[in-house]
Image: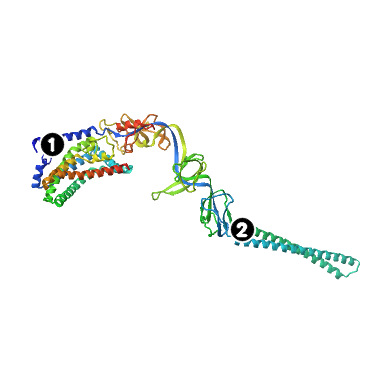
Amino acid sequence: MTTRGKVLVGVGVVLVAAAVVAANLYYKKADGKIVAVEGIKKRDLESVVSASGKIQAKTQVNVSADTMGRVTELAVMEGDIVKRGQFLMQIDPRNLQSNFARGEAGVAAAEATLNQLRNSIDLAKENLKLAQDNLTRQKNLWSDQLTTREALQRAESEFAVRQREVADREGQVRTQEARIRQERASLSSARYDLSKVRIESPIDGIVTRRNIEQGETVVVGTMNNAGTVLLTVADMSVIEAEVEVDETDIPYVKIGQVAKITIDAMPDKEFTGKVTEIGNSPIQVAAAAAGQQATNFKVVVTIDGTIDGVRPGFTCTAAITTDTRTQSTAVPIAAMVVREMILDDKGEIIRQKRDEKTGRPATTPSPTDDLPAGQTRKELEGVFLMKDGAAVFTPVKTGIAGERFFEVVTGLKEGDEVITGPFNSVRDLKDGDKVRLDPAAAKGGEKSSGSGVSVRVS
Amino acid sequence: MIGILTSPRATFERIVAHPTWVAPLLLMVLVVGGANFFFLRTDVGQQAMLEQQVSTMESFGQTVNDAQYEAMKRQGAFTPYIQLVSILVLSPVMLVVITGILHGVFAGILGGGATFRQSLAVVSHAGIVNVVQALFATPLNYARGSMSSATNLSVFFPFLPEGSFLANFLGTIDLFVIWWMLALAIGLSVLFRRKTASIMIGLSSVYIIIALAIAAIKAAVGNA
């Protein structure tokens, strides 16, 4: 290469190097972290407790059998709408019908016996009357000394025997009457048992579960034996969402609070309801992390109106509005941070002086350094305000928490600009750090700041 | 070694005639490693490294949580030493690997007549460009407070949307890498008696394909 060529290449390299340096320095990152800020506004806030659970009917009846036997007829399927008293299924009645017939025969036999006994009483009474007349006649004859003592004594004995006979017969009638009552009770029991082979719907509703097939044998159901439930009928005219609320939220949930219900199986639809029941006994739920347990409480939300197509067991989420504020000063949740600050004896924050050039603290006290008398360290909850290109930590006392905003009780006023992001910047910000907005993004953000976001920089 | 920068062809002819590779490798390792080490020992360097790590993870679609950030921050104290050791260990390894590939292609596949030692000397001397890059870019990085490359093409296009395919592609194309490839192409052309332009086109093609792949992956996972 000629000397001229080398010079040209050298000049080219220098020019490129200069261009690189110039580009880097011209577009050099300005001092301070790029942040996004949001203007403090008054907003309507809703404090919401969210919990998930299942949809269920307010009234739900598990139908079990009161008698054992084979199912001979099954009239419903899952999902069928049934009315109170509607026939559901028939259990084989033959055995119970035999019992009933036996009972009827027993009653009839006992009544016949009773009639016989009553007839025998009449006969005994006739005999008694004859014996009495004979005794009277023998007594009269005896008074005139016209009969023998033996004949009088025989008449007296005959009268006594006939009296006992009448009494015996009357006793037998009473016994037989008791037996008839016993037979009738048995008959009534058999009739009742027979009536139980025909199972009818106890309520208006939907058959939500059918655990039996025609031909299978049912056993007598008990409350604690889920396996004996034949059918479940749910009255879907009143629907509830039974959700599990975390123990930390449960103190804020009250009877009558309004809730919005979303059902996973019915996206894009939202239902309303009211809290109607709050459990007092905790439900222990195994959390994802091993060895941890979450403690929840049952809360029942009764949904307004009916929902077509809803089924018990659908997964749902209830957003219970536990508190509201109208036009309250609100700060974005993303802006809230906790910082350890040094306070003086009056509780005021002692701001650290910063190096003008680097923007870093002139002296950085270590967390373990002893502080001068009267000064204390304290963790404070607050936000960073953007003031004169710096992030200024401002303690804030918050009230209720909405979905995106906290209510500000003290510490901020409408129009203050709080730093809300990006997350990395907010996480590391310290009081007095230099911050800046990206001019290009700021311009775009201001144009579209209809929702209270004054500037959005990423 | 200065000749690599001022009159590369003549210098490479002398290197091919008397191949040595240790001195330029040592120089490169010491300068690049030292520059990195001292930069990362500064507060600016530490913060720049942290931002670079977060930015890289986020560009590949990952989210850095508080615990990871704190862990990276703690690790920052050891980063200068880790980087220094990495450069000391990996530079010779990379030198041998790159030489092996190039020697395999030009001597093995294309049938060029050269020894591995000569190839090693050419690749090692081409690395002098990295020394210049370290000396040029490190002060610039300190001034910018950034670990991102100060010499890639994206510095001329700051208006491109961050994370876009084009921005990622231009961010992968570095002027010093182009210079290093040019030096390498001249050295290989001297060594294997081939045209510099065709070698440069080959090396550039590989570089562009790699850059396109990286840009595509970043754009894809970054927007996912």
Chain under label 2? A
Circle 1 packing at 10 Å, graded few (<14), some (14-19), many (20+), is: few
The answer, for residue B26, to whether it is visible in the render is no
Residue drawn 13% across and 48% down?
Answer: B119
Specify the quadrant of the image occupied by residue B75. top left
- How many numbered tags mark residues here? 2
Marks 1 and 2 share the same chain? yes
- Residue A79 versus residue A235: which sits nearer the camera? A79
Chain under label 1? A
Quarter of the figure that contains the C terminus of chain A: top left
User: Residue at label 2?
Assistant: A194
Q: Where is residue A188 in the image (x, y as percent from the top left)?
A: 65, 57
Mark 2 lies on a secondary structure that is helix
A265 is higher (above) or lower (below) than A361: below
Mark 1 and mark 2 lie on one chain; the one further toward the N terminus is 1
Mark 1 lies on a secondary structure that is helix
A402 is higher (above) or lower (below) than A226: above
The answer, for residue A388, to whether it is visible in the render is yes
**Residue type (three-letter) at the residue carrying disc 1:** Val
Q: In this view, does B204 lie to the left or right of A212?
A: left
Checking the image for residue A9, the label placed there is 1
Q: How far apart are marks 1 and 2 (CA)?
A: 113 Å
- Residue B145 versus residue A377: which sits nearer the camera? B145
Quarter of the figure that contains the N terminus of chain A: top left
Specify the quadrant of the image occupied by residue A118. bottom right
**Residue type (three-letter) at the residue carrying disc 2:** Leu
